[in-house]
Amino acid sequence: MKARVILLLCVTVMSGALWMGATVPDLGYPLPPDPLPLQVPAGWPKPLPQVFAKNKPTEQGFQLGKKLFYDQRLSKNGQVSCANCHQQFAAFATFDHDLSHGLNDVLGKRNAPALMNLAWMPNLHWDGGINHLEVQPLHPLTAPDEMGESLDSIILKIKSDTSYTKMFRAAFGDAQINTQRMLRALTQFTGHLVSANSKYDKVQRGEASFTEYEKRGYELYKANCAACHPEPLFTDNSFRNNGLSLNRFHDIGRQAITGKPSDSLAFKVPTLRNVQMSYPYMHDGRFYSLYHVIDHYRSGIDTTQPTLDPQLKNRIQMTTKQRNELVYFLYTLTDSSFIKNPRFSPGNAVLVPGPDMHKAGMK
Amino acid sequence: MTANKLTLQNIFRGFLFLAAMLSLAQTLVAQDTGMVNLHFIHEANGKGLVLHDSVYTNRAGETYSIKKLQYYLGHFRIGGTGSMPEGDAYFLVKQPYVEEAKPLELKLPAGTYTSLGFTLGIDSIDHCSGAQSGALDPINNMFWTWNSGYVIFKMEGNSPSSPSDLGRIEHHIGGYKAGEDVAQTIIMNASKENPIRVLKGRVTDIFIRVNLDAYWDGIQQIRISENPLCMSPGPLAQKIAANFPAMFSLADIKNPK
């Protein structure tokens, strides 16, 4: 017993010394990965604490997450990556597709949403079925109509690729590869997809000004849309029924998760940021243009639905001219620096030297 | 990266570390521990469970066979002291097919105990704080990917009474939100004559009978003809889970001599 205690003490002292030495590179001890804290745009609420609670982002983790996001080998047939359905130039929605296409071009039942500002989103997916960003990828990775692969095979494939081994070590300190680390790396990438540099943002920061049209559109937005799509995120992330008819898949939305009849046809309010790029619109991509969307609010809302959001029971009164002004405003939410940001683009997921590589003099 | 400096932060770290070490050493010296091996014996109709091949009957005369049986246990407690064994918080117990069942190993403080308890299920916090590892790794296929949450008890099989496709029985029991919680606390008492004895450095074997008859006919009657499938949280999952505690009992305790 005593011998074991002493041994344990020695081991702990040694690892403690290593730990303290982590800030002392000139002694030749390994460097920790470079912290990459989420930048919170001015005037925004704090991101949700749970998103990165156990997964402090680092540059190395972000790069690994990016590689995973763009890696088609994670799918069963080696042809579908996250980015097949989440394309950067479409603000990470699927460009011009009402429904998403997965493995062997099997059609899904929902529209792939644009991905941005996810660190502020408590529940993911149109019905809010996903309770944490880290566990979200489990659905597309394994769903037969998305990437259709088993977690066992995915981990095997990753383990057999030495470039991954290096990146896992750089991000997490050792080469152990498991689902938790894979999911955390993906979260570091998707959680960093922040869009906050549109013309609208520049106007808020006093760096640009709206045209007359845009200004009137902004007022129309504040009067008619902001209740559910409030600034600065342009969503309150709540679940509501905005009066769309039940679709051919009998998609009842939130009710499938909560079991409550009062949640029938409620879907998550999507952000309006980059909405110009993320068409088609709504959970099943039924509208191809913003004009159709606003016309739905003006005249298409099914006011007989018992779960219709009360704010929409008289529909939204707006002239055609006002509709067009509103669309001009929505265009100001397009953030081209986000859509073109090379940090988020494929092809240059770089291996940033991490702990062991410094030691091995690989920098 | 800042260079080698005796910063306040480093000194503080040193102190913290020393304190942690001292308390660790203390607990190690103060507590003698022994091993407890828990053996789970799955039974139905008084016979040991054999996957796939054997046929069993519930009280309504519905016959069935079982292909898969696995569930999560955690928060082990002994003797009503509430003390927890060291190590992993959760274990995934599986009925093996051909391979030999591995006992579940706990390290417990030495002593004499009159009861053994655990939770069949997973704390709600562990359902909603992101990706987990170990027994809770989603690679174990006990996680709903479309409605985040763990399946805490999974039973799959077949029955001619099942109206479902190919006579399937698929019971995936889970649910952690308020009003949907399925986790059950299970306490099993040992007899006064043969309590659980944990001796320093020795192994105690405890055999736990898990009786599937009580799964169908416990506090609640579960009928294959009516409920061949249970694939999401809700009232049915809760009704089935209410039968869990009655399934578990202490079959035998082999204390070290």
Image (cartoon, rainbow, N blue to C red):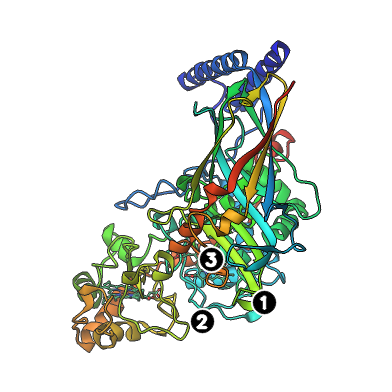
Q: Tally the numbered discs.
A: 3
Of residues B185 and B213, the one drawn nearer to the viewer in this rendering: B213
Quadrant of the image occupied by residue A237: bottom left
* Residue wearing tag 1: B166
Residue occupying the point 79% across, 47% down: B100
Q: In which chain is the residue bearing label 1?
A: B
Q: In which chain is the residue bearing label 2?
A: A
Marks 2 and 1: CB-CB under 8 Å?
no
Same subunit, tags 2 and 1: no
* Residue wearing tag 2: A97
Q: Position of residue A120 (x, y in %)?
A: 39, 55
Same subunit, tags 3 and 1: yes
Of residues A214 and B217, the one drawn nearer to the viewer in this rendering: B217
Of residues A232 and B193, the one drawn nearer to the viewer in this rendering: B193
Q: Position of residue A15 (x, y in %)?
A: 65, 24
* Circle nearer the N terminus (3, 1): 1
Q: CA distance from mark 2 to mark 1?
A: 36 Å
Amino acid under disc 3: Cys
Q: Is residue A212 visible?
A: no
* Mark nearer the viewer, 3 or 2: 3
Amino acid under disc 1: Leu
Residue occupying the point 41% across, 54% down: B177
Q: In which chain is the residue bearing label 3?
A: B
Q: Secondary structure at mark 1?
A: helix
* Residue wearing tag 3: B230
Residue occupying the point 61% across, 62% down: B58
Q: How many residues crowd around disc 1 within 10 Å: few (fewer than 14), some, or many (20 or more)?
A: few
